[in-house]
Amino acid sequence: MGTDLILGIETSCDETSAAVVDKGRYVKSNIIASQINLHREFGGVVPELASRKHLELLDRVIKRALEKAEVNFSDLQGIAVTYGPGLVGSLLIGIVAAKTLSWALGLPLIGVNHILGHIYSNLLEHPELKPPLLCLTVSGGHTDLLYTEEWGQYQILGRTRDDAAGESFDKVARFLGLGYPGGPAIERIAETGNSERFPLPRPDLGEDRYGFSFSGLKTAVINLAHNLEQREGNIPEADIAASFQKTVVDILLERVERALKDFPVDKVLLAGGVAANKYLRRRLEEMLKEKRASLYYPSLEYCTDNAAMIAGAGYFLLKQGKTSMLDLDAHPQLKL
Ligand code: KG4
Ligand code: ZN
């Protein structure tokens, strides 16, 4: 068997990443330079700083990805790059690099939707995975539940109307002074908290059976913390974090359970940064066990932003002839 090596480039947010992946599944290298420390003191990603850092790092990150994979530019079959959604200045750094390489090497350019990348991240460790399946993508920018009958096709069942699931973790953590990124901080402190102490709202979106909304929940948590501080003089962070995390997970699980009734599959995929949450994984696993379905999720390295998932998705797009022209532009609000 020959090789089908794709170089993936990911710069949509605060990780500068390049990867070499064979046949959309086999990771030869996945280099991630995280900017978390750069943004931490500001409590969130500063777009201007992020793009400058991508510009500074990307060249070296690509070089290391090739070295680690022990390949040369001439071994590659295509250049895949995230073109949205994300921060426009950050996306552009990756896109310009990818276009330059594509043009100079005479290789196809493949613009990849970042969310599609998250979904395909599951294939990197489960190459045998085959639809039909349901996939829940939960990250800092998106919350999408979709049904896939075959790779390359998908039906979006529901998405968020306002905040994404990860965004709500980040905002609540910021309010509670737990630092950035919020997801891991909430998960950590929630371990010591009582998740039953504060009942929180779970919006019912009526006919939008699979839709999500997290902004009301975030506001409720902030109001609750304010009131407790006024009444009792302190904020019980651990109990609030645990109650909040439980509510988010209850909401996610309810939608998945509904989808399983309408689309009785035996595989459910979890993807995106929030898929790193162990409490979410455990609760989903328990629920799916009753329904005789299996849960798949990527290991930590492939949950949060990385270029291997972009190279992976890029390979399948290339196979379908879905390549991009050199006028490929950044699409900050791109949807699936
Ligand atoms: O996929 P990702 O790296 O970037 C986006 O595409 O948005 O996801 C980042 C998001 C952040 O909101 C972060 O707080 C959340 O994923 N996250 C978590 C955990 N680890 C990361 N949320 C909950 N629990 C975690 N352990
Ligand atoms: Zn992401």
Image: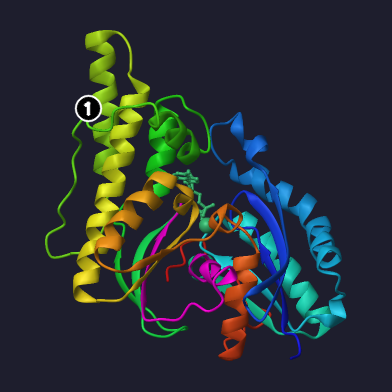
CB of residue at label 1: within 8 Å of ligand 1?
A: no
Magenta region, residue range:
118-140
Residue in the picture at 61% in, 74% down: 312
Residue in the picture at 36% in, 81% down: 132
Mark 1 is surrounded, within 10 Å at the Cα level, by few (under 14), some (14 to 19) or many (20 or more) other residues, namely: few
**For mark 1, what is the residue?**
197
Q: Quadrant of the N terminus?
A: bottom right
Can see residue 13? yes
Q: Nearer the viewer, residue 178 or 49?
A: 178
Q: Where residue 251 sits: x, y (%)?
A: 25, 51
Residue 15 in the magenta stretch? The answer is no
Q: Is residue 257 left or right of residue 165?
A: left
Q: Is residue 88 left or right of residue 151?
A: right
Query: In the displayed image of the protein, which residue is found farthest to the top?
Result: 233
Q: What element does badge 1 sit on?
A: loop
Q: Where residue 29 sits: x, y (%)?
A: 74, 64
Q: How many marks?
A: 1
Q: How is the image coloured?
A: rainbow
Q: Where residue 273 sits: x, y (%)?
A: 49, 52
Q: Where residue 324 sits: x, y (%)?
A: 62, 82
Q: Is residue 173 left or right of residue 51?
A: left
Residue in the picture at 47% in, 67% down: 334
Asked which quadrant contains residue 30, the reply is: bottom right
Can see residue 330? no
Q: Is residue 264 left or right of residue 270?
A: left
Q: Nearer the viewer, residue 166 or 30?
A: 30
168 w.r.t. 107: above or below: above
Q: Quadrant of the C terminus?
A: bottom left
Residue 135 in the magenta stretch? The answer is yes
Check disc 1 and give the amino acid type: Arg
Residue in the picture at 26% in, 40% down: 217
